[in-house]
């Protein structure tokens, strides 16, 4: 879970996740929208992939990135569980 929190600690990575929430995208398309270099974006994708927040689909030379919703759902469930336990202690 710490990988996930590390991944979402970056504003750029949060923007990437927000964009992927709306639709699957290629790295080139994301780089254009965020106005960042592909090498910088590659580093962000490595962190997101290590946290299993994104998955890739290769078609020829094109790689499309998608949001891994099951990991996001697990994260939200964990956070809600922590908050619920906090309310019980109040």
Image (cartoon, rainbow, N blue to C red):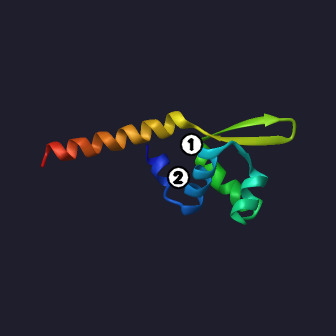
Determine which of the numbered discs, if any, sits on residue 53 in the image: 1
Quadrant of the rendered image containing residue 61: top right
Residue sitting farthest toward the right: 60
For residue 31, side relative to residue 19 (left or right)? right
Structural distance between the alpha carbons of marks 1 and 2: 8 Å
Q: Quadrant of the N terminus?
A: top left
| Residue 20 locus on image (x, y percent) | 63, 46
Tell me the residue at 64%/49% (across/down): 46
Tell me the residue at 24%/42% (across/down): 84
Tell me the residue at 67%/56% (across/down): 43
Disc nearer the start of the sequence (1/2): 2
Tell me the residue at 62%/45% (across/down): 22
Image: 36 above or below 73:
below
Image: 14 above or below 35:
above
| Residue 11 locus on image (x, y percent) | 54, 62
Determine which of the numbered discs, if any, sits on residue 74 in the image: none
| Residue 21 locus on image (x, y percent) | 59, 45
Secondary structure type for disc 1: loop
Mark 2, residues whose alpha carbon is within 10 Å: few (<14), some, or many (≥20)?
A: many
The reply to whether callout 1 and callout 2 are in contact (CB within 8 Å) is: yes
Image: 14 above or below 76:
below
Quadrant of the rendered image containing residue 53: top right
Determine which of the numbered discs, if any, sits on residue 7 in the image: 2
Secondary structure type for disc 2: helix
Mark 1, residues whose alpha carbon is within 10 Å: few (<14), some, or many (≥20)?
A: many
For residue 45, side relative to residue 2 (left or right)? right
């Amino acid at each position: 879970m710490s990988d996930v929190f590390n991944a979402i600690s970056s504003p750029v990575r949060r923007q990437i996740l927000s964009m992927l929430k709306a639709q699957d995208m290629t790295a080139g398309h994301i780089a254009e929208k965020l106005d960042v270099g592909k090498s910088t974006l590659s580093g962000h994708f490595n962190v997101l992939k290590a946290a299993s927040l994104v998955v890739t689909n290769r078609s020829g030379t094109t790689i499309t990135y998608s949001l891994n919703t099951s990991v996001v759902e697990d994260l939200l469930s964990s956070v809600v569980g922590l908050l619920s336990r906090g309310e019980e202690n109040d």
